[in-house]
Image (cartoon, grey):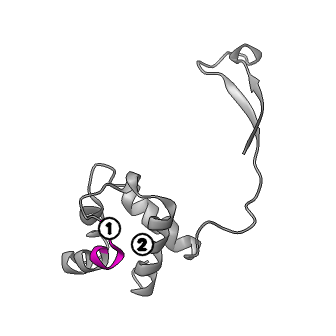
Amino acid sequence: MELLRRVPRTVFHPPPEVDSALIRLRRLPRPRISSPPEAFEAVLRVLFGARRKTIRRALMALVPREEVDALLRELGLDPQLRGEVLDIPQLDRLARALRAREVV
């Protein structure tokens, strides 16, 4: 991403309460995830749809508690974390593991 210029709120009518910016986005040479996009999106929906819940609790909407515990142990993820603290590689590994179990 490249910032091209800032756009002040005064150029809009009616003026918004925030300033804007014009940016340039460039495609990455290769995707940052290796899981199927629909599996990755499903994991995001589950984790971010339950923002105040731990990942353990959120994933229990998809699989039984025992499976969730085993999965998180296998992936080395703390079950008490919240979804918003996971980075993209962790989310990708979680999506691949759930896809392998035919959950998402």
Label annotation for residue 50? none
User: Residue shown at 35%/75% (left/top)?
Assistant: 75
Q: Amino acid at mark 1?
A: Leu
Mark 2 neighbour density, 10 Å: few (under 14) some (14–19) many (20 or more): many
| Residue corresponding to mark 2 | 94
The x, y position of residue 88, in whole percent, is 51, 61
- Residue at the top extreme, as displayed: 10
Against 72, residue 3 (above or below) is above
User: Residue shown at 32%/54% (left/top)?
Assistant: 82
Q: Amino acid at mark 2?
A: Leu
User: Going by the image, does 76 lie left or right of 31?
Assistant: left
User: Residue shown at 40%/79% (left/top)?
Assistant: 98
User: Quadrant of residue 60 in the image?
Assistant: bottom left
The x, y position of residue 4, in whole percent, is 80, 34
The x, y position of residue 72, in whole percent, is 30, 73
For the magenta stretch, what is the residue range? 72-77
Discs 2, 1 touching: Cβ within 8 Å = yes
User: Going by the image, does 7 lie left or right of 104?
Assistant: right
As helix, strand or loop, the secondary structure at mark 2 comes to helix
- Residue at the front extreme, as displayed: 76
Taking depth in this image into account, of 54 and 102 the one nearest to the observer is 54
Against 51, residue 72 (above or below) is below
- Residue at the left extreme, as displayed: 66
User: Going by the image, does 9 lie left or right of 100?
Assistant: right
- The verdict on residue 25 being magenta is no
| Residue corresponding to mark 1 | 77
C-alpha distance separating marks 2 and 1: 9 Å
- The numbered mark, 2 or 1, whose residue comes first in the sequence reads 1
User: Quadrant of residue 29 in the image?
Assistant: bottom right
